[in-house]
Image (cartoon, rainbow, N blue to C red):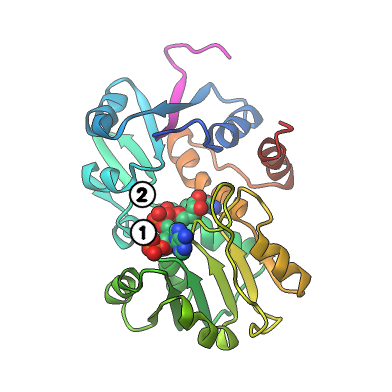
Amino acid sequence: MTVSGTTLRAGVVGWPVGHSLSPALHGYWISEHGLDATYEPFAVRPEAFASTLPALALQGVCGVNITLPHKEAAFQLVDERDEAAEATGAVNTVVFASGRMLGRNTDVFGFVESLREVGVNGVQSAAVLGAGGAARAIVFGLLSLGVQRVSVVNRTLEKANALRAFFGDKVIARDWPGLGAELPSCDMLVNTTSLGMSGQPELMVDLTALDRRAVVADIVYRPLETRLLAQARARGHTTIDGLGMLMHQARLGFAAWFGVEPQVTPTLKAHLVSILEGRG
Ligand code: NAP
């Protein structure tokens, strides 16, 4: 496309950034809406992040997504943070407006919308595997939906305890051996660890004790159907893959930068799946 002085510019800042699906996702919506806009990958080393973010604003960029390893640095750097950013300690979306950097965490919205999309509601008790950055967003999302008990199960128990200390006593901290005791009472199980992702060790969980009406979600999306989801699907559970969260979290940034509310559709999902599978 032709870039002119009036072209709206946004992008994603990460290191490395080549693996990000965000340019394909936003590029799809830009074409769909016929916008005079671009969405670019910005590869920025950690030591250059603090100087690069304000420089992008000065160059006329409307805003950016932030990916690994910069989400915590962005949290420190922005001028304002929304409630989800404060709850997660991480900023994944920045809007440059009137000389200020507005920091948001849209992963919370993305996860909640991915549940709504498949009609999941009324969850009372959930087990969350992992206690990293994504787990914080998901615990916050689950509590905001009214879930009464969230067990955070993590290899490093101190990190699960830190989530309990932050979010309060609806959160229970467990180590991996503690998962077995949690499963029978859960109506939702969510993997937020990097286990099961391409290039990482498999996530090995015995689902036998989980009620078959429980929903099983995995926010890993490479591969789209992880071992956990395949296992759960074979047992008849409703399953939710990680692309829903990714697509829905992107809506808020797109709307703020470009002034258009984009839609998550089966065609968009098929487009991203074709890229993940090397066909796009
Ligand atoms: P993170 O902060 O680095 O946390 C990683 C988590 O995985 C920690 O709880 C860690 O446990 C656990 N873990 C890693 N290796 C492990 C192992 N060998 N055995 C047991 N536990 C292990 O990462 P994150 O930012 O939360 O991201 C986690 C995953 O979510 C990634 O795969 C990422 O791609 C995905 N994600 C998806 C979306 C989406 O939109 N679908 C959004 C954000 C993230 P310890 O605390 O013990 O180290």
- Give the quarter of the image for residue 67: top left
Relative to 178, residue 163 above or below: above
Question: Can residue 108 be seen in this snapshot?
Answer: no
Q: Which residue is mark 1?
A: 84
The image's mark for residue 173 is none
Q: Residue at 30% of width from left, 35% of height from top?
A: 97
The amino acid type of the residue labelled 2 equals: Arg
Q: Residue at 22% of width from left, 42% of height from top?
A: 77
The image's mark for residue 104 is 2
Q: As rendered, which of 95 and 196 lies closer to the eye?
A: 196
Q: Is residue 32 magenta?
A: no
Q: Position of residue 252 (x, y in %)?
A: 47, 46
Q: Position of residue 209 (x, y in %)?
A: 64, 85
Q: Residue at 36% of width from left, 42% of height from top?
A: 69
Q: Position of residue 205 (x, y in %)?
A: 60, 72
Look at the image and give the residue range highlighted in magenta. Answer: 1-13
The amino acid type of the residue labelled 1 equals: Ala
Relative to 63, residue 178 above or below: below
For marks 2 and 1, the one nearer the N-term is: 1
Relative to 3, residue 280 above or below: below
Q: Could you tell me how far apart the alpha carbons at marks 2 and 1 are, in whole angstroms? A: 7 Å
- Give the quarter of the image for residue 162: bottom left
Relative to 129, residue 105 above or below: above
**Do tag 2 and tag 1 residues touch (Cβ < 8 Å)?**
yes
Q: Residue at 67% of width from left, 61% of height from top?
A: 227
Secondary structure found at label 2: strand
Which quadrant, please, contains the C terminus? top right
Which quadrant, please, contains the N terminus? top right
